[in-house]
Amino acid sequence: MIQRVQTIFMFLVAILASVLPFFASLWTLEEGTIIFAKDEFYISIAFYTSAALAFIAILLFKNRKNQFVVNRLNMICNLFILGFFVYRSLNLSGEAVVSEKGIGMLIPLFSIVFLVFANRLIKKDEDLVKSVDRLR
C-alpha cells in the first residue's frame, strides 16, 4: 500500500535530494562566490541519483524486501555525498578570510535519518506480515 508512513519519509528524501540542494548553499568561497549543487556537476548527479532511488523505492511498495534494499543503496549514496562534503569542508580555508559552510551540507544527513526511519517501518511491516503467515 502506497499510503504507508514510510512513503512519507521516502517522499521527504526525494524532495530533499531533488529540490533543496539547488536553493540551499553548499559553501561560500573566499572571494564571496556562493556554490550551489547546480554549480558542481558531480554533486548534482549524486543528488539526482538519491532522489531517483527514493522515487523508485516509493514505487516498490508491493515488494518490501526490494524497497528495503533500494533504501539501503540510497543510504550508501548519501554517505558518499556526505563524505565528499566532509572532505570539502575540511579543505576550505578557515584563515582570516573565512569560507563559510552552507546549510546544504546537512541535506545528506537528514536524508539518511529519514531513510533509517523508513527502513524501520518497512521492517516492522515485513515482520507483521510474517507473523500473520505463520502456520498454527
Image (cartoon, rainbow, N blue to C red):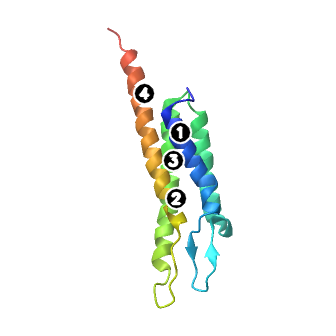
Residue at image mark 2: 107
Q: Nearer the viewer, mark 2 or mark 3?
A: 2
Tell which circle, 3 or 4, labels the residue nearer the N-terminal end: 3
Task: Calculate the distance from the C-alpha at mark 4 to the C-alpha at mark 2.
Answer: 28 Å
Q: Residues within 10 Å of mark 1 (few under 14, many from 20)?
A: some
Residue type at tag 3: Leu
Disc 1 marks which residue?
A: 8
Element type at mark 1? helix
Question: Crowdedness of circle 2 by 10 Å Cα count: few (<14), some, many (20+)?
Answer: many
Q: Would you place residue 128 above or below residue 58 in this image?
A: above
Q: State the quadrant of the C terminus.
A: top left
How far, Cα to Cα, is label 3 from label 1? 18 Å
Q: Is residue 70 visible?
A: no
Q: Nearer the viewer, mark 3 or mark 4?
A: 4
Of the image marks 2 and 3, the number of the one nearer the N terminus: 3
Question: Tag 4's secondary structure?
Answer: helix
Q: CA distance from mark 2 to mark 3?
A: 17 Å
Identified at 46% across, 57% down, the residue is: 109
Q: Examine the image and state in which quarter residue 31 appears.
A: bottom right
Disc 4 residue type?
Glu
- Residue designated by label 3: 73
The extreme top residue here reads 136
Foreground pick, 76 / 116: 116
The Cα–Cα distance between marks 2 and 1, rounded to whole angstroms, is 17 Å
Residue 7 position, x and y percent, is 54, 36
Identified at 59% across, 45% down, the residue is 53
Q: In this rendering, which labeled residue sits more in front, label 4 or label 2? A: 2
Q: Are marks 2 and 1 in contact (CB under 8 Å)?
A: no
Q: Counting residues from the N terminus, which is met first, the one under dot 3 or under dot 1? A: 1
Q: Secondary structure at mark 3?
A: helix
Q: For mark 4, what is the residue?
A: 126
Q: What is the spatial separation of the Cα atoms under label 3 and label 4, in whole angstroms? A: 19 Å
